[in-house]
Image (cartoon, grey):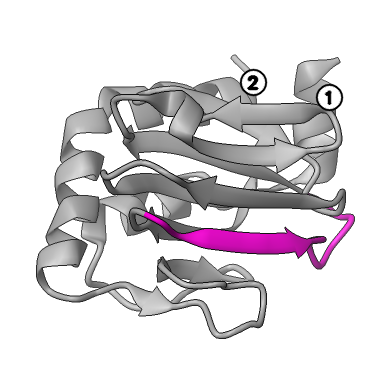
Amino acid sequence: MSAVTKLLSDLQSNHHALKEEAFAMLAMAGYKLWPEDINLGGWGVHGVQWDGKVVDNTAPLATSLVQKHSGLVVNAAYSCLLPGAEIAKHRGYSSQVLRLHYGLLVPDRPELCQLHTDAGPRSWREGETFIFDDTEVHWACNQSSQVRLILLMDLRKPEVEDDVQ
């Protein structure tokens, strides 16, 4: 079983608990507005790991999963997109990783809450994952009346590329 397959299996096995943990962050105001100018309002992040180091321990389940897959996962955070939120067009910071989005809580009408790339829009689905090249231009919006919560991770590129080929 590949490293990515093992990670995806662990995410799915822990889906409900991860969803509860992400939702608990909302209740304790654990999401910080993203400080860059790409945040056009309503996008918050709760850091779990940055550059291989744990950010804090207020998300113990996500932290333990990230540490279990430390050879693959570089960065991880819960991401909250509030109703009406927008993230401007931008490119990621590193060609050494691919970005994983794992849907935890998604609006009932997925077409109203999407990530857009040159390849077209992608909607988040609860319990499902998609991986994309964060260095390509992308943007997101939540035009629904519901919150979107995901777990995002930056995965070391060689391991992911070997897996998807």
| Residue 146 image position (x, y, % from top left) | 26, 44
Q: Judging from the image, what secondary structure is the residue with disc 1 in?
A: helix
Which is nearer the eye, 19 or 1?
19
Tag 2–tag 1 contact (CB < 8 Å): yes
What's the residue type where badge 1 is placed?
Answer: Asp
Q: Is residue 33 left or right of residue 30?
A: right
Crowdedness of circle 2 by 10 Å Cα count: few (<14), some, many (20+)? few
Which is nearer the eye, 130 or 120?
120
Residue position for label 1? 162
Q: Which mark is residue 2?
A: 2
- Quick check: 14 above or below 140? above
Q: Is residue 12 left or right of residue 36?
A: left
The stretch in magenta equals 84-97
Q: Is residue 120 left or right of residue 101?
A: right
| Residue 157 image position (x, y, % from top left) | 81, 43
The quadrant holding residue 29 is: bottom left
What's the residue type where badge 2 is placed?
Answer: Ser
The quadrant holding residue 17 is: top left
| Residue 74 image position (x, y, % from top left) | 63, 59
Q: Does 165 lie within the magenta span? A: no
